[in-house]
Amino acid sequence: MLQPDLNAEDIIYMRRCLQLARNGQQNAQPNPMVGAVVVCNGRIIGEGYHVRCGEGHAEVNALASVKQEDVHLLKESTIYVSLEPCSHYGKTPPCADLIISKGLKRCVVGCVDPFAKVQGRGIQKLRDAGIEVTVGVLVDECRALNKRFMTFHQLKRPFVTLKWARTRDGVMGVKGERLMISNTYTQMLCHKRRAEHQAILVGRKTLEEDAPSLNVRLWSGRHPQPVVLGSNVKNLPEGWWCFQTVEEVLNVLYERGVQTLLVEGGRTTLQAFIDKGMWDEAFVEFGDFSWADNADGKDCETILVPTWKDAERVEDEVVMGRHIEHWKHVAATE
Ligand SMILES: [Zn+2]
C-alpha cells in the first residue's frame, strides 16, 4: 500500500524521468542514465535527460528547456530527478547549486547516487538551502536502470556479463571442429551487446585458436576494449590488454574506470568467473539442434556448458524464434 506521503503524482513524474533517462542508453556512459522533469501545479514546464558524457546533466537540460514565459513559475515548482543531483564539480558545475539558484520549491529524488563524491551530499545541500526533498520514489526501478553504474561504484569492480551459445544438448564447442550455433540475427544481437560494454574478454585458447576481432561490426556503436585472460599468451594483438587472473582483470579494469565487461568465453574462462562468483548476468543462446543428432556417429570430444549455482532465470529474449535465456547472479547470503 502507498504511504500517504508517497503520492500518485510523484510516481507518475518519476516514471517520466525514467522514460527520459533511457534515451541516454548508448551515449551517457560511463555516466549514469538520468532523467529530470520540472512540474508546476500539475503541468510539466520542462524536461531533459543526460544525453552524453561531458555534456549537461539531466537537471541542467530540464531547467534550460523551461520557456521564458514559465520561468517565473520555478519558485513554485518541483523538480523530479531519477538520481540524486550532484554536489561536486565534475565536467560541469554541481546540479544541486543550480537547483538552489533557480529557487525551486521541492525536489523529488529517485535514488541516492553511490558515486563517492556525491553519496547524499547533493540531497543534504538542497535541504540546507531550505528546499523540501523527497527521496526514494520508484527507488528500485531507478537503481535497476543504472545497475551497471551502481555495481561499479558499490562493489568497486566492473559489472560482468557472461555470454555463450549452446546446442539443445548442452554442447558449446567441439574440439577440432567449428560449431556454428548462432544465426544471422543472434550474431547481430551479439554485436549490439558488445556495443553496450566497455570491455570484452576471451581466454587465451579462444584468442589463439579463433583469433576473434571482438569489435562491433553488425551494429553501430563503440568498440569495446579487447582483453585476454591467461598466462603465456603468444602474439598478443596490438591494443589488447592481457591479465593472468580474474581478480587482476577486475582490479585493473576498475582502476582504469571500465564499468562493464562482457565475457564471451570459452568454457574455462566462463567457469573461472562463475567459480569466483564474479558475474552479474548471463545470456545463454539456445541453438535449434542437438549435437548428438548432428554428429553422425563421429567420435568427437565435446565441450559442455559451464556449471553454476546461485543463478536465477529472469526472462527470455526471443529473437526470430531463437531463445536466449537471461540469468542473473544471486549473491549467496551469509
Ligand atoms: Zn549533475
Image: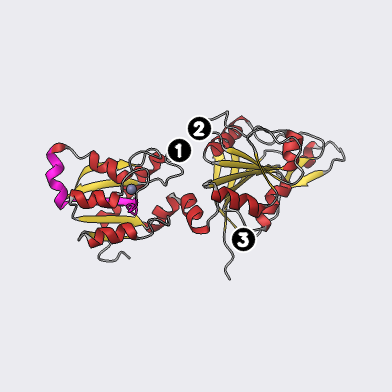
Pick the front one: 60 or 87: 87
Question: Residue 100's spot in the image, x, y percent?
Answer: 22, 53
Between circles 1 and 3, the one closer to the viewer is 1
Decide if residue 259 is on the left or right side of residue 104: right
**Residue where numbered disc 1 is placed:** 26
Q: Residues within 10 Å of mark 2 (few under 14, many from 20)?
A: some
Question: How far apart in space, not on screen, are marks 2 and 3 (Cα)?
Answer: 32 Å
Q: Evaluate if marks 1 and 2 touch, with contact meaning CB atoms under 8 Å apart.
A: yes
Q: Is residue 211 highlighted in magenta?
A: no
Comparing 308 with 153, the one in front is 153
Q: Which residue is mark 2?
A: 221
**Element under label 3?**
loop
Q: Residue flagged by tag 1: what amino acid is it?
A: Gln
Q: Residue at x 59, y 65 (%)?
A: 332
Q: Position of residue 102 (x, y in %)?
A: 19, 48
Q: Which residue is mark 3?
A: 310
The segment highlighted magenta reads 69-88
